[in-house]
Amino acid sequence: MIGVFIVPTGVGARIGGDAGDANPALKLIANCCDMIITHPNVVNASDINEMPENCLYVEGSQLDTFLDGGANLEETYGNRILVVTNTPVKPDTMNAVNAARHTLGAKIDVLGLTTPLTMVAYFDADGQATGTVTGVREACADVHKFEKSVGITYDAIAVHTEIVVPREVQLQYFKDGGVNPWGGVEAKASKELANYLKRPIAHAPVESIPPTDTELYNIHVNKIVIPRGAAEAVSCCYLHCVLKGLHKAPRLTTDRSCIRAGAHVDFMMSPAGVWGPAHYSCHKQGIPVIIVRENTTIYKGNPPQGVDVIYADNYLEAAGIVMAMKTGITSESVRA
């Protein structure tokens, strides 16, 4: 049993819209499967990542390509990771890299960019998190030049750069919740970099709050924040979740002996109201889509008329549906 578990970023999902707060739901569903495939937004929780051992970590646009049949997934065991960051390289970055070297046992090198990768977050007219990214091509050129100089083609790229978010937006989020302002532009940057570099990519933000901004800085050090944002408040670097995910992230391949969406994926699980490219691809490939009603978002996209989906009221019911599928029994046969 192979499943795909998604929670799109930047749309205010009640579960998975904050700092890795979909980890428990993912672990529940993963325990019903032999393998679960997900994307960074689901499990990234700053310095925390609780993804289970049977989980594959795939950047969002590459997951879309996989589900559409444009590529297959090849499992990996111990990727060589290149951390790309703006210059000068911060001590926090090096501390996170060294910690991962000695806890994950990962091969990790660091590259300081010659041209800054600049990311600015904002909300669009519909209230969804998005943003602008500049310096992508220059960053990719730096990666290729560095790889040529050291004679290594890295298996995965971790990007660790600052995201500019207005301080009043940060204050409101940590005090009152709402749509996470960082995730949308992170997804955008990861997609653009993945399109150029053609390998696993994930982004982690660099802390940008100056200690002199006592109101915002103190939220992180001695204030109780919204529960689902607490992982960010207890983290200092935000990079470890990405390094853990990329350490064994699968690569895209045309090898038909590897994991193929249409042949091997048994279902995709999604929040309500976020019908998009992945859902259309699953419909095209004949992959059942399980929609969890309780996990609402600010986005209002519904399945087209005539497209059958499976609805679950919550993730507990969704786990039962997956177990019924795995056992080969109909849901109707176990209900009065």
Image: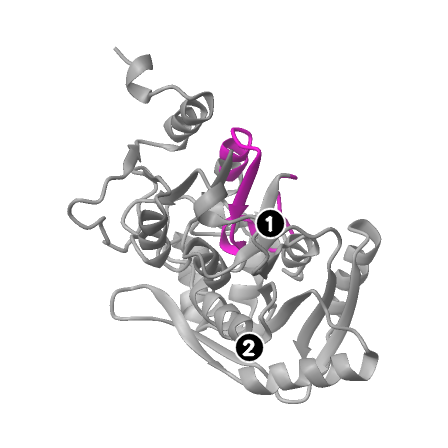
Residue 69 in percent (x, y) is at: 44, 56
**Which region of the structure is painted magenta?**
26-53
Q: Is residue 38 magenta?
A: yes
Q: Earlier in the sequence, mark 2 or mark 1?
A: 2
Instruction: Look at 37% across and 43% down and name the residue there.
Output: 287
Type of amino acid under label 1: Ser
Q: Nearer the viewer, residue 60 or 18?
A: 60
**Residue highlighted by disc 2:** 196
Mark count:
2
**Residue highlighted by disc 1:** 257
Q: Nearer the viewer, residue 317 or 47?
A: 317
Instruction: Look at 49% across and 42% down and name the residue there.
Output: 264
Residue 317 in percent (x, y) is at: 37, 26
Toward which corner of the image does residue 122 lie, by quadrant? bottom left
Please tell me whether mark 1 sits on a helix, a strand or a loop: loop
Q: Nearer the viewer, residue 177 or 257?
A: 257
> Is any atom of residue 210 visible in this view?
no
C-alpha distance separating marks 2 and 1: 25 Å
